[in-house]
Image: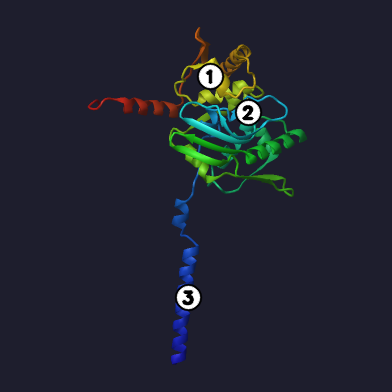
Amino acid sequence: MKKVSDLTGRVAQMQEKSKLQVDRKAPSESTLQTNVVQLPVWPDSVRGLPNGVLRSALFGVVRRGKRAFLQAEQMASVENLSVLFTGPRLDQGDLDVCEHCFHLARTGPLGTRVQFSAHSFLKAIGRDTGKSQHEWLENALRRLMSSVVEIKDGKKSYAGQIIHHWARDDDTRQHVIELNPAIARLYSKDGWSSIEWKQRLGLKGQPLAQWLHGFYSTHAQPYHYKVETLLKLCGSENRELKGFRRELKKALEKVASQTGWSWSIDETDLVHIDKTPTRSQNRHLTRRKTDKKPRGTA
């Protein structure tokens, strides 16, 4: 009987030890839930992007043809924002792909696989669905995966690939992407903006107009920028200020036709934009006014 008792004791000890090892290896469900990182869930009619992406030349106004490869290049950006970039120059077509990738990834935990067909993806970004467009999409996804950004926007920062992983299943023809959960740091309160997707699609094929639309969408009350400043910020390859000013006027007119915004360029070459803030931007303006109230006021 003693042997049986000893054996029973040793089995109990082994079971307890095994349980402790399992507990160490497998976190509880509540722990897993607290580690889930997600993007804000915006509606289908918009696309959500960090302001640092839209307030810089990261996705610039790039001419067609062979692209330059940049190595730790400091991209033009607004004050209090730093964007360091390594990879092939990215254009507004690449931004369409980036926006829709983030849009698809917003409904689940970051770092998990997001699957889609090239056909549905191309239709969603307003592209044709022929063979050449399938090839273009794959190249755009490669560019985003091979691009590394270091973004510092105030206290928010991110360093890593724009798309952490991309692959295509040759059997199912499905594409798979993953986003780095750390990119959620750029989506803190007031750190990102909604882009009206229908308006952007209405500017397809007009890169400067698309860049202006994204840039000014991040402003609740747009600052007045000089034409020369916008030339730098949009990453235009047109280095002639006079020629860029002509392009800018045409692009602003196209943006106004899609959005209802009004614009003007004054005698000092300052660009003025008048637009209605979104709901979230109105909340931001209200908070800013409240923060500026003197002590003792209601």
Q: Are marks 3 and 2 in contact (CB under 8 Å)?
A: no
Residue 225: where, in percent of width, then height?
50, 17
Q: Earlier in the sequence, mark 3 or mark 2?
A: 3
Which residue position is annotated with label 2?
92
In space, the residues marked 1 and 2 are separated at their CA atoms by: 19 Å
Q: Earlier in the sequence, mark 1 or mark 3?
A: 3
Q: Name the element at disc 2.
A: helix
Q: Name the element at disc 3.
A: helix
Above or below, 53 against 230 in this view is below
Amino acid type, mark 3: Gln
Q: Residues within 10 Å of mark 2 (few under 14, many from 20)?
A: many
Query: Residue 210's mark?
Result: none
Amino acid type, mark 1: Thr
Amino acid type, mark 2: Gln
**Residue 284 makes an appearance in the image:** yes
Residue 195: where, in percent of width, then height?
54, 29
- Work out which quarter of the rendered image holds the N terminus and state it: bottom left
Which residue position is annotated with label 1?
229
Query: Residue 15's mark?
Result: 3
